[in-house]
Image (cartoon, rainbow, N blue to C red):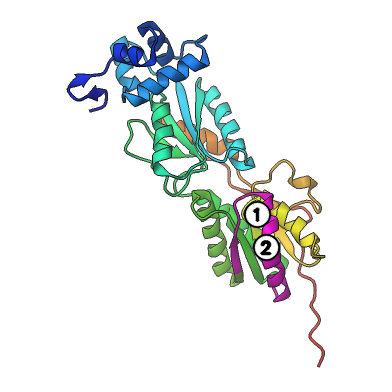
Amino acid sequence: MSGDVGSKRIGVREVAAAAGVSTQTVSRVLNGYPGIREATRERVLTAVAALDYRVNNAARALGTSLTRTVGVVASDAVLHGPAAGIAALERAARARGRWISTAYTDSDDPADIDTAVRHLLAQGVDGIVLVAAHGSTPLDGYDVPIVPLYGESGTRQRDAAALVVDHLADLGHRRIVEVAGPPDWREALARTGGVADAVARRGLTLIDRVEGDWSAASGSAVADAIGARIASGATAVAAANDQMALGLMAGLAARDLRVPRDVSIVGFDDNPDAAFYAPALTTVRLDVQGEAEYAVAAVLGDAAAPPASPVLVVRDSAAAPREVSPPPR
């Protein structure tokens, strides 16, 4: 049972002894008291986690409430998408009189994620939102609600990816290549699903699907493969995020392939720099703030308006495919 070691129930005294602090300090840390040194706070929280002493039990014993904090478990926060999501969650939580507490993990190992979740549970969070959730990320088995930022189904991610393909089809493209995100990410799988749905619905041909890791470097790294597909008749690329699209454009330019003269490219996310790429990147924008407000409401058991539908942002990186002269007889 949580809070027990063998037959002995773990209490504040045991946590204090393990952390080498007073019981008053433990109480202050558990209740979010300001002015606690970070090293002391971490020592107490480490002891709480090691002893499996749960703050919800502590709150009852101390006659206090939860900490009015929403937990966030985030990975790959250096990327634009996760970073924007965390900032949006901060605003959404503040609007409901909460703060966020974030535990970072760069691993898709369920055990590592479980450690991050339990670290937040030890702080008495009201619920947890997962940013950049991997397919292996656990969503149940805990005492508080846990939801992915963009919803478990990824419906709006699929719809956004379909907008990309529809735009390319409307321009006249019939043979496209997909630069997908890493397949262990829920968001990447949803975007790939949206591309596949729209390709089938519009009667297009998906020439190839290559995978990147969301970085511009990975987009550049697949430029040779994309160049080969262009040579065999592909005229457009659907990239799973703007950073990979940027890297791909640079990689193709180094091979004397120009966008959109030789190939059209559409990205995903509408990051703040997309309008300043050369050429300016056509992309699709999600309602990140709306998604954050919806997720925070979900973990708090409240209602919120659903996020707005994704929007296609048309710029200069996609155009009608140029005419290809037939081979000489």
Identity, as a three-letter code, of the amino acid under mark 1: Ser
Q: Residue furthest bottom?
A: 329
Q: CA distance from mark 1 to mark 2?
A: 15 Å
**Quadrant location, the N terminus:** top left
Q: Which mark is residue 218?
A: 1
Q: Taking the image as drawn, is residue 67 in sight?
A: no
- Taking the spot 79% from the left edge, 51% from the top edge, the residue there is 280
Left or right of 52, for residue 197: right
- Give the camera-side residue of 221 and 242: 221
- Helix, strand or loop at mark 1: helix
Left or right of 224, for residue 115: left
Q: Which mark is residue 237?
A: 2
- Helix, strand or loop at mark 2: strand
Q: How many marks?
A: 2
Question: Which range is magenta?
Answer: 208-237
Where residue 253 sits, quadrant-wise, is bottom right
Where residue 109 sits, quadrant-wise, is top left
- Give the camera-side residue of 142 and 108: 108
- Give the camera-side residue of 115 and 99: 115
Vertical order, 245 against 124 (above or below): below
